Amino acid sequence: FTFALTLIDTVILLSLVIWLIVRRGESPRKVFFGDRPVVPESILGLVSLPVVIVLVAALMIAIRTGLPQLWNVLKNPLEAFLETQTGLLTFLFVVIVAGGFREELQRAFLLYRFREDFGQPWIGVLITSLAFGMGHTLQGYDAAIITGTLGAIWGVMYILRRSAVAPIVSHSLFNSAELLRVFFLR
């Protein structure tokens, strides 16, 4: 049910975003991907993964040693989906499609609007990162901080590159690596 609902949400949200872009006479391709070629952007997303992993590990260590009260969820409730190989494969599909793809297209749309309508893409990074982080409080306050930080990184990548390809690849690979880590190391 959770997976189906997430995928339905993805279709509805992206349909709404595309409708809003087209309604303004803009190109969804330009908003999401700019003029950059896909392959170099994908490579950038791949190359960013080790940096993202090291940053997350450093943040996690800093939070758990310096502010241990923020580690308020000892076992991520989403780990229940990882009890079987079928659960892992299904969850991998969901975190790539709904996590990496949908969230980064949504972030790109919002940051594009902040840049075009308000001239303030950096305020957009701050607001969207806080919102995305708060959306992960179910996983713990530490996870919300880390997720907000990751959102800021991927948001900055989009603003600097004017393409969501690298953030999509980086986000999807990070989510996949996290699931595989949890599945194989529990």
Image: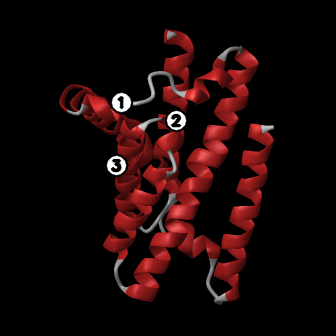
| Residue nearer the viewer, 143 or 170 | 143
Above-or-below relation of 81 to 14: above
Disc 1 marks a residue whose amino acid type is: Trp
| Residue that label 2 marks | 175
Q: Amino acid at mark 2?
A: Asn
**What is the quadrant of the N terminus in the image?**
top right
Q: Nearer the viewer, mark 3 or mark 2?
A: 3
Give percent across and percent down for residue 181.
Answer: 49, 19
For label 3, the SS is helix
Precedes in sequence: disc 1 or disc 3? 1
Classed neighbour count for the residue bearing mark 2: other residues with Cα under 10 Å, few (<14), some (14–19), many (≥20) = some
Pick whichever of labels 1 and 2 is earlier in the sequence: 1
Residue 137 appears anywhere in the view: yes
- Quick check: 40 left or right of 142? right
Residue plotted at (67% across, 80% down)? 20
Amino acid at circle 3: Thr
The residue pinned by badge 3 equals: 149
Q: Secondary structure at mark 1?
A: loop
Closer mark to the observer between disc 1 and disc 3: 1
The outermost residue toward the left is 66
Q: Is residue 34 visible?
A: no
Q: Please say if the residues under marks 3 and 2 sit with CB atoms less than 8 Å apart.
A: no
> How far is disc 1 from disc 3 in space, using C-alphas?
16 Å
Q: Nearer the viewer, mark 1 or mark 2?
A: 1
Residue hosting label 1: 71
Q: What residue is rendered at 49% in x and 35% in y?
A: 139
Crowdedness near tag 1: few (<14), some (14–19) or many (≥20) residues, C-alpha within 10 Å = some
Residues at badges 1 and 3 in contact (C-beta under 8 Å)? Answer: no
